[in-house]
Amino acid sequence: MPSAYKLRIYRALNIISLFAAIGFLFACAEIEKKEQLLSAAGFSIKYADTPEKLDHLKLQEQHKIVPYIKAGKNYFVYADSSGCECMYVGDDTAYQQFNNLEVEEDIANQQRINAEMNQEWEMDGSRWGQPWGNGPWNGYGLYHY
């Protein structure tokens, strides 16, 4: 029978593993969301379909949009060697569109959060009455007594 000390260590390792798995899932979801925005913004996808291309892709900075200049023209590259084994490539227009889509998504998320908070506020007591009764703390004030 394992000692109490060993049981605590096993539990701690299990909890750490659980949090690591949850963090990994959130990171994967963020990467997938970013890649969807890149596609929607007009970035083209270049797959690493040969071992040489995959080796070159692995040398690029991963999961970050990096600017490049080629033949006097600006390009933006997003490399993903661990997921799709591909590279997203866009020009100034695609990059600007990507930024606009990110801002629009942030605004939509904030509006959704605000709507949820407003709904919770309405359920909190405006229609159901205050659970703590009437008093100076909810608008009736001491002058009404």
Image: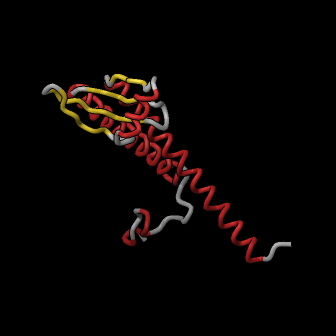
Q: Is residue 39 left or right of residue 69?
A: right
Q: How is the image coloured?
A: secondary structure
Q: Nearer the viewer, residue 50 or 8?
A: 50
Residue 6 picture location, percent across and down:
74, 73
Residue occupying image coordinates x 40% and y 40%: 109
**Residue at the limit of the structure toward the front, as seen here:** 52
Residue occupying image coordinates x 61% and y 61%: 16
Residue 46 picture location, percent across and down:
38, 23
Look at the image and tell me in which quarter the C terminus lies: bottom left
Residue occupying image coordinates x 41% and y 64%: 140
Residue occupying image coordinates x 30% and y 33%: 77
Q: Quadrant of residue 131?
A: bottom right
Q: Nearer the viewer, residue 120 or 78?
A: 78
Q: Is residue 111 left or right of residue 129?
A: left
- Answer above or below: position of 45 versus 5: above
- Answer above or below: position of 44 versus 29: above
